[in-house]
Amino acid sequence: MCDHAVGEGAKLVDVSKMERRDLLRGLATGSLLLIAGCATNPVTGREQFIIIDESQLQQASLQAWAQMRQQVPQWRNASAQRRLETVGNRIVQAAGRGGQNWEFVLFDSPQKNAFVLPGGQVGFYRGLYEISDRDDYIATVLGHEVGHVTGRHAAERYSREAATQTALQAAGSQINSQLAIAALGLGAQVGLSLPFSREQEAEADIIGLQYMQRAGYDPRLSIPFWQRMQEGGGARQPEFLSTHPDPDNRIARLRNYINQQGWGPV
Ligand SMILES: [Zn+2]
């Protein structure tokens, strides 16, 4: 479903053809009440509402990435780095995205977590690496992360947030143009720091399985991997666990998909 911000007297505008300045002005004055930004995702076939363009996301990713790398020390481990890149390269090839720039960086933190920016920067924490004793486990994580990128999840999340702000503004009781501007502002960090939705997490899992399989890894091993993550417990994991209040669900969905594909007993 592709939803819109709708208000009274709304006019349909193709924001992709608008100058950014006009777009901001339209949002700020409330004259732009309905935003049309429907796109069909080539990977998932799902209709998505997206009103940010690729170059803005790339720019924001570079900024966020530079900041991240200043704040968190890198884990200098040449063999781990080689292994991460080897699996990463196979996954991005399988995703048909080998021609794009990707970066895979190990961060020195005990967190069992990983993250991705829409520009293709992947952060992988030492704590997660240490429980990933099989390449298939690393492939599970990277398939999922690359799935967020090809699924255009950050752009979608960001667009929804911006539209919500606009809708609130259009409702009119408390017109706060700053809100709309902030939501669409240069600080596209807003979009990068928003958590993915449960639907997006589920989608990234399935896309990830497809990439694993195409890359020659065993997608069935995603199940023991996620079980191990679950057992690990400990701190809340913002990317992996917080949007999954019921981890058993995730495993059931994966098992279901693997069975449907006929990839062998799980
Ligand atoms: Zn995720």
Image (cartoon, helix red, strand yellow):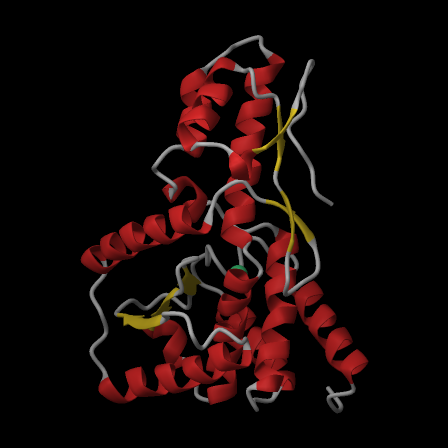
Q: Work out whether 83 lies above or below 2.
A: below
The quadrant of the rendering that contains the N terminus is: top right
Image quarter of residue 3: top right
Image quarter of residue 179: top left
**In the drawing, does residue 194 fall left or right of residue 11?**
left
Compare residues 199 and 33 and report the one nearer the observer: 33
Q: Position of residue 173 (x, y in %)?
A: 57, 8
What residue is at 37 percent from the left and 71 percent from the top? 102
How many tags in the picture?
A: 0
What residue is at 67 percent from the left and 19 percent from the top? 10
Q: Position of residue 205 (x, y in %)?
A: 61, 68
**In the drawing, does residue 1 fall left or right of residue 227?**
right
Residue at the far top in the pictured view = 173
Q: Position of residue 167 (x, y in %)?
A: 60, 23
Answer yes or no: is residue 130 visible.
Answer: yes
The quadrant of the rendering that contains the C terminus is: bottom right
Compare residues 62 and 107 and report the one nearer the observer: 62
Residue at the far front in the pictured view = 17
What residue is at 45 percent from the left and 44 percent from the top? 191
**In the drawing, does residue 260 fall left or right of residue 54?**
right
Answer yes or no: is residue 221 visible.
Answer: no
What residue is at 40 percent from the left and 27 percent from the top? 21
Q: Position of residue 129 (x, y in %)?
A: 38, 78
